[in-house]
Amino acid sequence: MRSVVNISLPFSFNQVIEEAVEQGRYASKSEFFRDLLRAWMEGRLLNSLKNSRQEIKSGKGKLLKSLRDLR
């Protein structure tokens, strides 16, 4: 299921998006924003993984050997 989201952008931002679509880098403005959201979500996940690795290195994290260790 999809939802429609309307946003207001400064004219200069809209021009950048329209140019990207016109140049064929995106099929539509919607695809531009979907790609932007995917990249943002990926960045959050990578940051979370980085923080987890730092916790493990500092001794604060717990390295699980099996799923039973979750209990």
Image: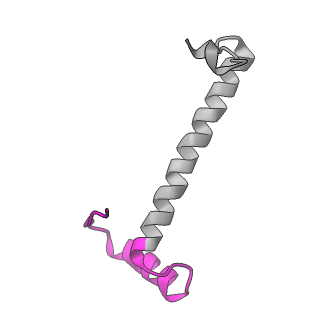
* Residue 39, magenta (yes or no): no
The correct choice, above or below, for 66 with respect to 38 in the image is: above
Q: Which residues are magenta?
A: 1-30
Q: Residue at x 48, y 81 (%)?
A: 27
Of all residues shown, which one is farthest toward the front? 68
Q: Is residue 44 left or right of residue 59?
A: left
- Percent position of residue 3, x then y: 27, 63
Query: Number of marks in the image?
Result: 0
Rendering quarter of residue 4:
bottom left
Q: In which quadrant of the rendered image does the N terminus lie?
A: bottom left
Rendering quarter of residue 51:
top right
**Residue situated in front as seen by the camera: 26 or 14:** 26
Of all residues shown, which one is farthest toward the bottom? 22
The correct choice, above or below, for 16 with respect to 50 in the image is: below
The correct choice, above or below, for 53 with respect to 4 in the image is: above
- Percent position of residue 5, x then y: 27, 64
- Percent position of residue 6, x then y: 25, 67
Rendering quarter of residue 60:
top right
**Residue situated in front as seen by the camera: 46 or 63:** 63
Q: Residue at x 73, y 18 (%)?
A: 65
Q: Is residue 16 left or right of residue 43?
A: left
Q: How is the image coloured?
A: one colour
Q: In which quadrant of the rendered image does the C terminus lie?
A: top right
Q: Residue at x 51, y 78 (%)?
A: 26
* Residue 11, magenta (yes or no): yes
- Percent position of residue 63, x then y: 70, 17
Q: Residue at x 66, y 19 (%)?
A: 55
